[in-house]
Image (cartoon, grey):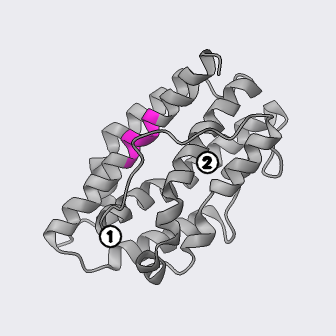
Amino acid sequence: MTSTLRSQRINQITHAPHAELDQAVKANDPFANRENFSRFVVAQYLFQAELQSLYQDAALVEVFPDLPARCRAEQARLDLADLDTDVPAPVAGAVQNPSFAEALGWLFVSEGSKLGAAFLIKRVAALGLTEEVGARHLGEPAGGRAEGWKSFTRTLDGLELSAEQEADVDKGALAAFNRFRELLQHAYTSADTPA
């Protein structure tokens, strides 16, 4: 009997929020112009900045030794500078001290988004942006996207977790999708109101 891998299960349970997020991104048309794209980068920066503490967490780094290098908050901050966009203030509601298992769910969503970035990076060329200017956070990670993801999911799938922890992983992944959608909405609605 083949049991579903943890990474496959998370993909299945997050299918609906993932689809909703994709729709929300499309609705804001981030590739229409640089202004729209800069709002998208604001959301990316906010999300990555909120997860910085997880990427530095000692217990998580013990499991994923390359975790600190995987964080894209700094790349997104540099992209904002390229796009003449201020670094946004934090938005209330960021994840605070999640359990180890919950943090795995958040990281799964953050790391998985690098696969989608392979399609997005092709779209930014029309805006005159590249992996070096304005779209660093969408750039190819060292070692390649596919390999980075495979190595992350291999480790994730190999962890021994209790039933309660499995539920926490799922909870974290669902929360991560919902949070990114909130930040995306914030980034685009705050652009309409004068600071």
Determine whether 79 is above or below 29 in the image.
below
Q: Is residue 92 left or right of residue 29?
A: left
The quarter of the displayed image where residue 67 is located: bottom right
Disc 2: which residue: 117
Which residue type carries mark 1? Phe
188 or 166: nearer the eye? 188
The quarter of the displayed image where residue 46 is located: top right
In which quadrant is the C terminus drawn? top right
Q: Is residue 171 left or right of residue 143?
A: left
Can the viewer see residue 113 in this picture? Answer: no
Q: Is residue 153 left or right of residue 194?
A: left
Numbered-mark total? 2
Which residue type carries mark 2? Ala
Disc 1: which residue: 100
Which residue occupies 28% across, 61% down? 169
Which residue occupies 63% across, 70% down? 69
What percent of the width, then of the height, locates residue 109?
44, 54
What percent of the width, then of the height, locates residue 114?
57, 54
- Please name the predominant secondary structure of the magenta segment in the image: helix
* Closer to viewer: mark 1 or mark 2: 1
Q: CA distance from mark 1 to mark 2?
A: 26 Å
Magenta-colored span: 176-182
Can the viewer see residue 61 in this picture? Answer: yes
Determine whether 168 is above or below 63 in the image.
above
What percent of the width, then of the height, locates residue 151?
50, 74
